Amino acid sequence: MKSKRTIIKIFLALVIILNSSCEDLVSIDVPTDKLVRSQVFDSEQTAISALTGIYNELYQSSFSNGSRNSISVVSGLSSDNIRNINTSNLERMEFEEHQIYPENSYNLELWSSAYNIIYMTNSFLEGLSASEKIDTDLAIQLEGEARFVRAFTYFNLVNLYGSVPLILTTNYETNALSEKSSIESVYQQIIEDLEFSSDVLKASYRTGERTTANKFAANALLARVYLYSEEWQMAEKFSTKVINESSTYEILDSLNTVFLANSREAIWQISPIGGGGIATNTNDGSIFVIDPVFTFFASIQLRDSFVNTFQEGDKRIESWIGYNESLNAYFAHKYKIDASSDFPIREYSMVLRLAEQYLIRSEARLHQGKFSEAQDDLNVIRARANLEPFEAQSEAMLLDEIFAQRRKELFTEWGHRWLDLKRSQRVQAIFGMDQLWDPTDVLYPIPTQELIKNPNLTQNDGY
């Protein structure tokens, strides 16, 4: 019993250290996690617990928690899908108006929380590689999962900020003075991590829950990475691997079941259990759903112009869009539960799902001249929404419809619309007439606090 308490204390010490932000780490002389790391990785049980702590931290971290300062919210505000109800929150309004100041605290939390996750994965990987007490097969499995989380985090950073420091160690002296790495080198590291994960991870989920990374989570993220890199053949290859795994994944006919915990459309989810206590609902549900009684808590609504893009009969209007009469506001209703006391947990925060893979493959195939196959993939998504098959008259028409369906299918999920507008060079057409818009607004500013601490960091253009 005494030895178990000692292990728990050691693990808690590591978690506390790992949860410290990167800005705190550069102000100490010697990272004290080195004092406990050897003991934490002296046991398979505590090594697994440490990785579980990283997954749980994704629900706490600002960039990934689905709450008011998450990518889903602030990058959604940067796009043309959602808007603020309460305009008195000036820092959140900066994202909507594309006037983000480098001192914006939401922006700082995006940046620092992402780098905190990166530090946690780096520390985990270093401890794992130095351990001689972990079974080889388990160690490879855990490494694959940790590298997946790191790749996922860097993907979001590089797409929001452009060139960012590529930090792969816990060396505090080096990290504190890291310069920006090129976008290409960051993508290269993302691909290296994900290809490793794809090679070593199993098709099954280690815990039986879709909240840990498996082979197909790595493949799904690789498909997205290659799509953004315009490597169409590779994007098609990895999306096909996921789509063909029909024993595990399927497009669900009932839209109301898509965002349930461990739904068969889910490839990777984040569980609210990481919030601890009685938090049993997703932050996504809490932030996007407008309570019919307590409307004064509402902060985000769908833009009418976005809702009006849906065709009559589209099932996504009925299942995924709600309307509050007193506020005269539409809201995202993908998540149904907004009460923190609801138990057992019925919904997990969706990160990767099968519908996106069909849209990735459709776009990738179109760019390779596979017109008919691209149209077929698109129509899988349209059919689920109760829409007639789309018959394009040109490649341009089909590409426009792919992006239109991405907008309608993936709204309020991980800033997809904002990133789609940027990578497709459509952002200027949408916001170019706005007097506040400047082409350099496609990237968020490097937080002022980071520039002060690190003289080798440079600000993005336009700020």
Image (spheres, helix red, strand yellow):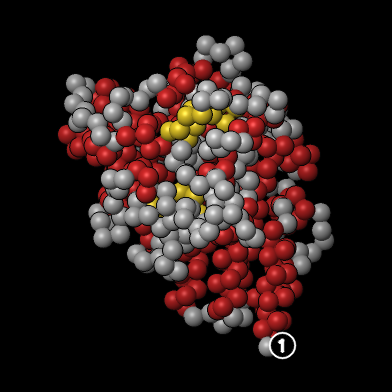
In this figure, which residue is indicated by the disc labeled 1? Answer: 2
How many numbered marks are there? Answer: 1
> Eyeballing the image, is 338 above or below 120?
above
Element class at badge 1: helix
Quadrant containing the N terminus is bottom right
Quadrant containing the C terminus is top right
In terms of depth relative to the viewer, which is nearer, 141 or 93?
93
Residue 113 appears at what percent x and percent y? 65, 48
Residue 43 placement: quadrant = bottom right
Note whether residue 358 is visible. Answer: yes
Q: Residue at x 59, y 54 (%)?
A: 341
Q: Amino acid at mark 1?
A: Lys
Residue 69 appears at what percent x and percent y? 63, 39
In terms of depth relative to the viewer, which is nearer, 109 or 460?
109
Residue 255 appears at what percent x and percent y? 34, 43
Residue 197 appears at what percent x and percent y? 43, 61
